Amino acid sequence: MAPCATAGAQMLAARPCVSASQSMLASRAAVSRIDLALGASSFASCPRISCSRSLGSSRSSPVAVRAVSGEGSSSGLPIDLRGKRAFIAGVADDNGYGWAIAKALAASGAEILVGTWVPALNIFETSLRRGKFDESRKLPDGSLMEIVKVYPLDAVYDSPEDVPEDVKTNKRYAGSSNWTVK
């Protein structure tokens, strides 16, 4: 494996080294495949991508790249979100993209509000209250991510008029109100 240092991350590739700025990575633990057969003209507008061999090769040669957090990497996003509120829809546990997004925004200083699917709302709030997510709530600075408010949300329905009667009367939706988008 050939390691390449980038800003805040270390790229490990089984074949020729491909390096990219940290802002191009969706996550420090992201796994992606980069197809080098696209040709140099495809990357003309991306000056931060470099490769140890020509991109103009006529044969396809995919490279698996894994981003590994570097020891000197900065914590959170490279922006200051103190005093800002962030609403993240689709957080129902500590394993999904919503949780990771909330955690990254919290590490940058944002106040976190989440929208949780109504049938999962009770389980999520109970788990949060009992501390089941405490380990994964830890931010890079050692503090815990604080979720200010959890809203019931079912983004399938734009307004209460759009909700079918069988959903309105479903026991999993009982006790919750104002959970449509509008």
Image (spheres, helix red, strand yellow):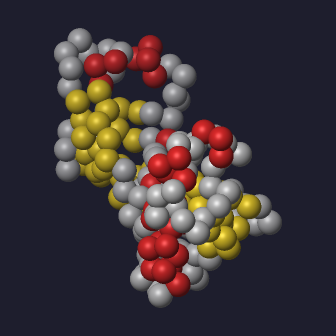
x and y percentages locating residue 54 in the rendered image: 31, 21
- Residue at x 46% of width, y 22% of height: 43
Nearer to the camera, 180 or 125: 180
x and y percentages locating residue 178 in the rendered image: 67, 57
Nearer to the camera, 63 or 162: 162
Residue 82 at least partly seen: yes
Q: On the rendered image, what quadrant is the C terminus found in? A: top right
Q: Is residue 67 left or right of residue 150?
A: left
- Residue at x 46% of width, y 63% of height: 172
Q: Is residue 106 above or below residue 21?
A: below
Q: Is residue 133 left or right of residue 30?
A: right
Q: Residue farthest to the bottom?
A: 130
Q: Is residue 172 left or right of residue 81?
A: left
x and y percentages locating residue 93 in the rendered image: 43, 67
Q: Residue farthest to the right?
A: 83
Q: How many marks?
A: 0
Q: Is residue 33 left or right of residue 69?
A: left
Q: Quadrant of residue 104?
A: bottom right
Q: Is residue 26 above or below residue 171?
A: above
Q: Is residue 36 above or below residue 6?
A: above
Nearer to the camera, 92 or 76: 92
Residue 104 at least partly seen: no
- Residue at x 25% of width, y 45% of height: 13
x and y percentages locating residue 50 in the rendered image: 41, 33
- Residue at x 20% of width, y 50% of height: 1
Nearer to the camera, 104 or 57: 104
